[in-house]
Image (cartoon, rainbow, N blue to C red):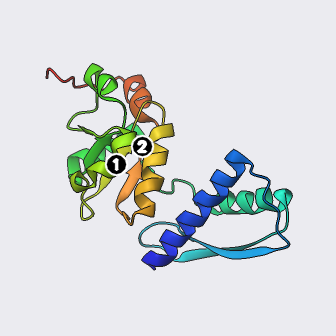
Amino acid sequence: MKKQNWMANLLGLGLFIYLLVDIGYHSSALAFPLSLTKSLSTPTTKVTAVVNSNSDVKTALDTYLNSIPRGYYTVGNVEELQRLINEDHILLIDVREPSEYATGHIGNAINIPLPKLTQNLEQIPQNQPVVIYCTSGYRSAMAVMSLRLLGYDNVRGFPPSINGWKAANQPLATSAT
């Protein structure tokens, strides 16, 4: 099951990167299965894509993205994050740069800047819930996908990120506090 999740994430990331760089790859036909786990406790959904052209790649990616369940790998709102902080003893990771972290971060969050993520894997447990945030959700999404590809099935992102936390008038900690 873990290998299927890893392969699904790798294939999804590959499709995403392909579309970003638009390398113009054309093949007669490339078929592959994509496995998506809806959550840790639900069954797997399988999607099969056959790629013949750029149009087919976009269609395959669309199928992949539309098959991801709502809320997949995320903590969707401030209230849910507060509950997790209070009840589940999560590790909160801020992937912003140290200067951003110093100006204000969520409670007991540790700072591991996104470019340094793989150099700090020893700080990220695989047996405890982990939630990652940044400023707007972009860097945290990359961090979550990267850690998922490395086998971390306990990692979720907080898409509202620090901007959502501030908008909800929640307190910020600073390096001095």
Cβ atoms at labels 2 and 1 below 8 Å apart: yes
Which image quarter: residue 88?
A: bottom left
Instruction: Please state if 164 lies on the left or on the right of 113 as rendered.
Output: right
Q: Residue at x 84, y 68 (%)?
A: 52
How packed mark 2 is, by other alpha carbons closer than 10 Å (few <14, some 14-19, many 20 or more), is: many
Amino acid type at mark 2: Phe
Q: Along the line of sight, which residue is nearer the eye, 29 or 83?
A: 29
| 47 is higher (above) or lower (below) than 132 | below
Q: Along the line of sight, which residue is nearer the eye, 105 or 23?
A: 23
Amino acid type at mark 1: Val
Q: Residue at x 34, y 24 (%)?
A: 100
| 89 is higher (above) or lower (below) than 52 | above
Residue positioned most to the bottom: 1
Quadrant in which the C terminus appears: top left
How packed mark 1 is, by other alpha carbons closer than 10 Å (few <14, some 14-19, many 20 or more), is: many
From where the camera sits, is residue 68 visible?
Answer: no
Check disc 2 and report its element: helix, strand or loop. loop
Counting from the top left corner in percent of width and height, residue 125 is at 24, 59
From where the camera sits, is residue 12 visible?
Answer: yes
Q: Along the line of sight, which residue is nearer the eye, 160 or 177?
A: 177
Instruction: Please state if 1 lies on the left or on the right of 18 as rendered.
Output: left
Counting from the top left corner in percent of width and height, residue 121 is at 28, 54
Q: Residue at x 46, y 66 (%)?
A: 39
Residue positioned most to the left: 177
| Residue pointed to by mark 1 | 131
Check disc 1 and report its element: helix, strand or loop. strand
| 147 is higher (above) or lower (below) than 162 | below
Counting from the top left corner in percent of width and height, residue 142 is at 48, 47
| Residue pointed to by mark 2 | 158
Q: CA distance from mark 2 to mark 1?
A: 6 Å
